[in-house]
Image: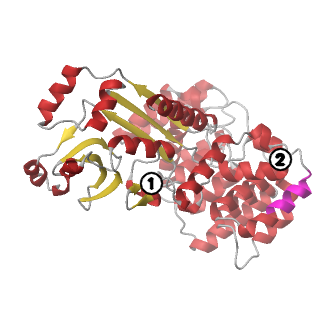
């Protein structure tokens, strides 16, 4: 049985990785020696239940793995929180809670519990030794905020079996709740069957196979959420009219997350073909799409000048000119155009770190912009310094700047005449800066100036 479990766990991990998710590989240590088990029981003051002891003695003294789906993955509403899973136990980390220690810690619900795992939110997975007289102690979930206990399975090995059937979801209560019944995790319920079907489909979908028909490609995208190079290439194999027709057909009946995915199909796969439809979105009184999605489509489908004007006017009117930097970034960063910097001269505010500096950085400032803001008022100067730091952080973290839905161009200062000129400029700012914290920031930027400069001016549309 254990060998089959290991095969099932590795299959889940491999499939999640193939679909772009993150995993922590299965860790299996050798079985525990008899003396190690004896010493641990002496330390705990109670015997380790047979169901767990067998796994420790015959298979592994420590086991752990975890998986998480890609951020863009679109789960059904009822399983929206089940974006990750994990399973594990360790002989060394077993902990038994005596009644007095539980009461002293304000955790009366843990009295008589043998804890074998902890959820990320501080809740505990445990064997309820208070019920051992009736046979094997059940596995329970203890909530630290309420000090309440929920049944997960009647024994440890049954817990492992049920978790494996559910692809080891968890380990926080809100990830288990959809499947809990009177006997704990119910792997045969209608919800469990829907989850297993969805997860199996997600794991089995391959872009190459899905791209054979438009319907299957849409299904793939509505599971995975992202529309990147491979998906875009697949979409462009089909007539734009067919792609657009299917988007319009599916939009009204789709979930909010699916509508975002369908919008990505339009933005990345159709572009200007959908321009007239996007213009119509600005006239709708009861829109299906969010304002952020509409701005995204405006960036991808309309001419630059028209798109900027529409989104900027919307922000000005919607917030009476007092929008947050985070909102401005959400709507305007995808343009990656200097006209946004010109707009910021009037509307940006302090503190710069609350979205405004990142918007400046993402808007592809050129050498003239940098010199102008360095000589401006305190708001502009602080925004510039923070923006240069934002650029450096992006480069040093080795990340591709992205706006969630699609990749953006690198964020650097464009049109710098030479490295020497940039360093001299920054050294002058350093000498003029009165604050030590800003001096330290500028020194860091000077030391890594090559990472945030480009010699060529960006193309202006």
- On screen, residue 230 versus residue 454, left or right, reads right
Residue at the location (63% across, 42% down)? 203
Residue 452's image quarter? top right
Extreme residue in the front direction? 134
* Type of colouring: secondary structure
Say whether residue 245 is magenta.
Answer: yes
Q: Which residue is mark 2?
A: 235
Where does the image place residue 332, in percent across and percent down from the top left? 65, 56
* On screen, residue 190 above or below 450: below
Callout 1 crowding tier (Cα within 10 Å): few <14, some 14–19, many ≥20: some
Answer whether residue 79 is visible to the viewer in this image.
yes
Residue at the location (33% across, 56% down)? 151
Say whether residue 329 is magenta.
Answer: no
Q: Which residue is mark 1?
A: 175
- First-in-chain label (1 vs 2): 1
Residue at the location (21% across, 26% down)? 37
Residue 116's image quarter? top left
Magenta-highlighted residues? 239-247
State the mark number for residue 304: none
Answer whether residue 431 is visible to the viewer in this image.
no
- On screen, residue 316 versus residue 179, left or right, reads right
């Amino acid at each position: 049985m254990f060998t089959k479990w290991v095969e099932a766990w590795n299959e889940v991990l491999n499939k999640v990785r193939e679909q772009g998710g993150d995993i922590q590989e299965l860790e299996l240590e050798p079985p525990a020696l008899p003396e190690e088990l004896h010493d641990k029981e002496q330390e705990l003051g109670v015997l380790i239940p047979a169901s767990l002891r067998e796994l420790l003695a015959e298979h592994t003294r420590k086991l752990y793995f975890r998986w998480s789906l890609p951020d863009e993955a679109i789960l059904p509403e009822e399983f929206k929180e089940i974006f990750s899973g994990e399973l594990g136990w360790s002989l060394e980390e077993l902990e038994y809670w005596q009644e007095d220690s539980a009461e002293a810690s304000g955790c009366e619900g843990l009295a008589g519990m043998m804890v074998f795992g902890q959820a990320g939110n501080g809740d505990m997975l445990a064997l309820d030794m208070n019920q051992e007289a009736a046979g094997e102690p059940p596995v329970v979930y203890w909530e630290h905020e309420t000090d309440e206990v929920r049944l997960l399975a009647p024994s440890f090995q049954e817990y492992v079996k049920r978790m494996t059937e559910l692809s080891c979801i968890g380990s926080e209560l809100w990830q288990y709740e959809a499947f809990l019944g009177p006997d704990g995790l119910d792997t045969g319920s209608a919800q469990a069957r829907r989850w297993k079907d969805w997860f199996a489909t997600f794991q089995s979908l391959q872009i190459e196979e899905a791209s054979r028909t438009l319907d299957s490609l849409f299904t793939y995208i509505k599971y995975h959420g992202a529309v990147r190079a491979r998906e875009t290439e697949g979409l462009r194999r089909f007539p734009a009219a067919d792609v657009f027709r299917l988007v319009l057909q599916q939009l009204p009946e789709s979930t909010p997350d699916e509508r975002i995915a369908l919008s990505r199909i339009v933005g990345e796969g159709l572009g200007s073909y959908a321009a007239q439809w996007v213009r119509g979105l600005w006239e709708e009184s009861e829109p299906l799409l969010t304002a952020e999605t509409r701005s995204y489509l405006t960036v991808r489908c309309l001419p630059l000048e028209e798109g900027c004007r529409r989104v900027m006017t919307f922000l000005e009117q919607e917030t009476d000119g007092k929008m947050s930097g985070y909102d401005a970034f959400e709507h305007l960063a995808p343009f990656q155009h200097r006209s946004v910097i010109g707009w910021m001269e009037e509307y940006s505010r302090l503190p710069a770190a609350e979205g405004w500096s990142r918007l400046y950085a993402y808007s592809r400032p050129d050498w003239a912009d940098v010199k102008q803001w360095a000589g401006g008022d305190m708001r502009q100067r602080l925004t510039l310094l923070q923006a240069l730091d934002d650029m450096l952080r992006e480069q040093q973290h080795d990340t591709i700047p992205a706006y969630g839905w699609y990749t953006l161009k690198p964020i650097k200062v464009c049109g710098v005449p030479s490295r020497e000129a940039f360093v001299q400029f920054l050294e002058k700012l350093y000498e003029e800066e009165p604050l030590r914290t800003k001096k330290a920031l500028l020194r860091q930027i000077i030391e890594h100036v090559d990472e945030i400069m480009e010699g060529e001016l960006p193309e202006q549309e």
